[in-house]
Image (cartoon, rainbow, N blue to C red):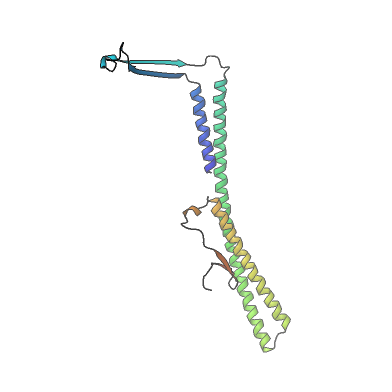
Amino acid sequence: MRSAEELLHSASAQVGVATANMLPNVTINAVGGYQAPWLAPFLAPENVFWSMGANATHTVLDGFSLLHQRRAADAALDQAAWNYRSTVVTAFQNVADALRAIQNDADALKAIRDFERAAKVSLDLAQQQMQSGNANFLYLLNAQVTYQQAVLQRVQAQANRLSDTAALFMALGGGWWNRVGPPPEMKIDVLTAQVVPYGARP
């Protein structure tokens, strides 16, 4: 948006330049000094002189080139204005799309967390049945696979949400210039699958 705005300002300035080229060019000159027939009274006040002059020039026959240059500048201004409008609409659309994606990611993450909790309950029941002798090893293994798949889906959903959040920051134009120092180094906790700073306690 900032680039399109600057292009619009530049096109507007070019219209002003093209308009000024169609007007007469006026020049005003002023000359001052001292004159005397000999050196002794050279700096006397009565020997001061001033001379002023002005001239104006204007192109008479230019084959309407200045008029066409002005029309071209007007057309470039219109193009820059439409480009700016299109850029603004696209920017708002990108923000709206990013917000909708984040909302969808939140809904998906909630559903996956519910599935993960259900898979954990099934795994706990399978372990209890295995210990009591009411289930075989394959039943327990299937419950463990289901639970680990749920954990992987939750991590993927969290990654999608972080990616869409970054896309929202990009659509909004950043914001990282407000940070005082460099961002902290992050790591992924393998137990909770959460992104935490280095040195953080589990």
The residue that appears at 52% across and 36% down in the rendered structure is 8
The residue that appears at 50% across and 24% down in the rendered structure is 19
| Extreme residue in the bottom direction | 132
The residue that appears at 50% across and 27% down in the rendered structure is 17
Q: Percent position (x, y) of residue 27? A: 43, 19
* Residue 110, placed above or below residue 36: below
Which one is nearer the viewer's eye here, 177 or 52?
A: 52
Q: Going by the image, does 177 lie left or right of 163?
A: left
- Displayed quadrant of residue 189: bottom right
Q: Percent position (x, y) of residue 163? A: 59, 58
Q: Percent position (x, y) of residue 97? A: 58, 52
The residue that appears at 55% across and 48% down in the rendered structure is 92
Q: Going by the image, does 46 lie left or right of 92?
A: left
* Residue 90, placed above or below residue 179: above
Which one is nearer the viewer's eye here, 28 or 100?
A: 28
| Extreme residue in the front direction | 39
Q: Going by the image, does 141 lie left or right of 178?
A: right
Q: Percent position (x, y) of residue 149? A: 67, 71
- Displayed quadrant of residue 46: top left
Which one is nearer the viewer's eye here, 55 or 2?
A: 55
* Residue 99, placed above or below residue 4: below
